[in-house]
Amino acid sequence: MSLEISITDQPGGLKRIALGGSLDTDTAPQLQQEIDSQITDAVNTTIIDFKELDYLSSAGLRVIFKAKKVMDNAGGKLLLVNLQPQIKKVFEIIKALDGMNVFKDQDEMDAYLTDMQNKVKDGDI
Amino acid sequence: MISSNTPSVIDQRTVNVEGLVSNCQRLFDEWESFAVDAGIPADVRHELKLAIEETFVNIASYAFDGNMDRTVEMKLTHHYAEERSHQDTITISFLDHGIAFDPLAKSAPEDQESFDEGGMGIHLIRSLTEQQDYRRIDQRNVFTLSRSYTPQ
C-alpha cells in the first residue's frame, strides 16, 4: 500500500498535512521528508488530517511524535484531526493521546482555531 | 496431531521471504489473501496485519548479522471452531535462524515517552494478540502469536 500526502498552507502560519492510504515502515520516511522540509519557522500550527488514512504502524507513530517535538520546541502546536477508529486504537494502545491535541472532525478543530485566533486578537496570548 | 474424537478443521499457509524490511508488503499480501479466503472479519484482519508488520520489522532489523541466512518463514494457521458457539483461532508463527532474541523479555513501558525503537512495536503486538510465545528450537527463533474471534 502506498501513502498519499497532500500539503496546503493556510493563512496565519497554518500547515495542513492530509494523509491517505498506509503510514507504515515502508512509507514513514516519505512523511518524515515532507515534515522536515515543510515545517519551517514560519509555521506555528501543523494540522495532520488522518481522514483518508487506513493503516498506521509504530514507524508512522514515530514520525508523528517527532513532528510533535519539533512543534513543541518551536512553541507551536500540532493538531490531529479525523482519526478513524482503527487509527485511534493504535494511538490509544501506545497511550499517545495524552498531551496531544486531537479533534474528532473539522468542525471541532475549526472551533478551536477560531477560539485561539480570538484570544490572540484580544491579547490573551 | 489431530485425534479422531476431536475433529478440527484448519487452513494453513507458509511463506518464506528474505528478512529485509522491504519484504513486509509480501507478507501483507499473503496475509490478506489467506485471511479473506478464511472469512476473517476486517477488524481482526487489520489488527493482525499490524502485528505482522511489527514482528517482521523487529526480526528484519535486529535478528541478523553479517552473512547469516536471512530467511524468515511466516506460517499462518486458522483453526475453525468445532461448534458454532466456539471461537475460531488464528496463529501466526515467525521462524528464523537469526541471533537468539526473546522479544517478550522486555516489560511494557509506563508511558509514551519511555517507548524506545523496539518497545512500541512489541507493546502493539501484545495488545493486538491474546497469546505470544517465544522459543529457541534447533538454532531457530520461533515466535508465535495467536488471536481468537467469534465467527459471524
Image (cartoon, rainbow, N blue to C red):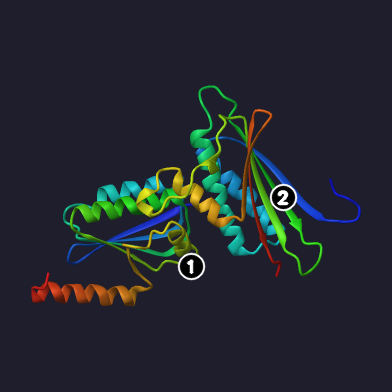
Quadrant assignment, res A16: bottom left
Question: Residue B136 in the image: x percent, y percent?
Answer: 64, 34
Q: Could you tell me which chain the residue with mark 1 belongs to?
A: A
Q: Position of residue B108 (x, y in %)?
A: 47, 50
Q: Chain of mark 2?
A: B
Q: Are marks 1 and 2 in contact (CB under 8 Å)?
A: no
Q: Position of residue A29 (x, y in %)?
A: 38, 45
Residue tagged by mark 2?
Answer: B77
Residue found at the very far top of the displayed protein: B67
Quote the CA–CA distance across marks 1 and 2.
27 Å
* Disc 1: which residue: A85
Q: Which mark is residue B118?
A: none
Q: Residue B77 location in percent, x, y?
A: 72, 50
The residue at the point 29 percent across, 55 percent down is: A68
- Residue A29 located left or right of residue B57: left
Taking the spot 52% from the left edge, 36% from the top edge, the residue there is B60
Quadrant occupied by the C terminus of chain B: bottom right
Q: Residue B55 occupies which quadrant of the picture? A: top right
Look at 60% across and 26% down and name the residue there: B69
Quarter placement of the N terminus of chain B = top right
Mark 1 element type: helix
